Image (tube, helix red, strand yellow):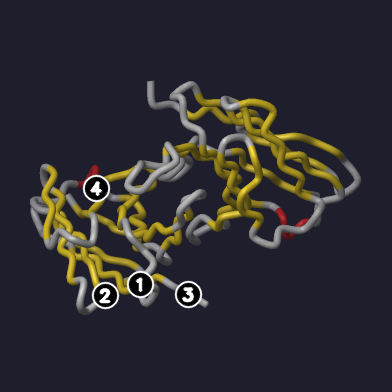
Amino acid sequence: DTEVTQTPKHLVMGMTNKKSLKCEQHMGHRAMYWYKQKAKKPPELMFVYSYEKLSINESVPSRFSPECPNSSLLNLHLHALQPEDSALYLCASSLVSQGNIQYFGAGTRLSVL
Amino acid sequence: QQQVKQSPQSLIVQKGGIPIINCAYENTAFDYFPWYQQFPGKGPALLIAIRPDVSEKKEGRFTISFNKSAKQFSLHIMDSQPGDSATYFCAAESGVSARQLTFGSGTQLTVLP
């Protein structure tokens, strides 16, 4: 099983809402990632968790709050987002070493109104 | 600062043609170079990858050529098919305790029947 499952697939939220994106994998991967992808652009790294600890935060605004409750789950909590935050949010996972594939989920398409 | 430069931005070939996508990097800390394929509405999926101590790698119809001294690498798709129509991203990976992918800007490939 090489699947990374993201829910929901689509999300529409207002600027005052609080919502969460979820990501799950059962491949035994100890590195998990959040990316943001705008249309016709490459994925941009937001956060990296390694062994359930936040290892990289690419200067992401605090209205995005990641959480890794265990080695299989990754959440992204959203609060007070702006319309420019509308994008495809991708989760990925991998083993923690050189040359290991990052497996991506299908993403959550987020629209902020 | 764009650390991985990718060209061309778009590419149209006839079925059976050999599209070539080129990438260049500057950061010598990169130690793994994957290519990802992304279809609309899907997350990126690993296509093929290469380590910098190898000059060429073939997997099926896909070949990576790697020139370490020039800091350049390219993807060739042999006998291209309409089903290969997708966006292709080169990437470069680095990091010790937390692996980090840096993507190129992407190439939208169209293979005409």
Look at the picture and state if B12 lies above or below B63.
below
Subunit bearing disc 3: B
The answer for how far apart the CA atoms under marks 1 and 3 are is 14 Å
Between A45 and A87, the residue placed more toward the observer is A45
**Crowd tier of the residue under label 3, counting other residues whose Cα lies within 10 Å: few below 14, some 14–19, many 20 or above:** few
The answer for how far apart the CA atoms under marks 4 and 3 are is 22 Å
Mark 4 or 2, closer to the camera? 2
The kind of residue on which mark 1 rests is: Thr
Mark 1 or 2, closer to the camera? 1
Subunit bearing disc 2: B
Q: Are marks 4 and 2 in contact (CB under 8 Å)?
A: no
Q: Position of residue A34 (x, y in %)?
A: 59, 45
| Residue at mark 1 | B28
**Crowd tier of the residue under label 1, counting other residues whose Cα lies within 10 Å: few below 14, some 14–19, many 20 or above:** few
The answer for how far apart the CA atoms under marks 1 and 2 are is 8 Å
Secondary element under disc 2, as helix, strand or loop, is: loop
The answer for how far apart the CA atoms under marks 1 and 4 are is 21 Å
**Crowd tier of the residue under label 4, counting other residues whose Cα lies within 10 Å: few below 14, some 14–19, many 20 or above:** many
The earlier-in-sequence mark between 4 and 3 is 3
Mark 1 or 4, closer to the camera? 1
Whether labels 3 and 2 belong to a single chain: the reply is yes
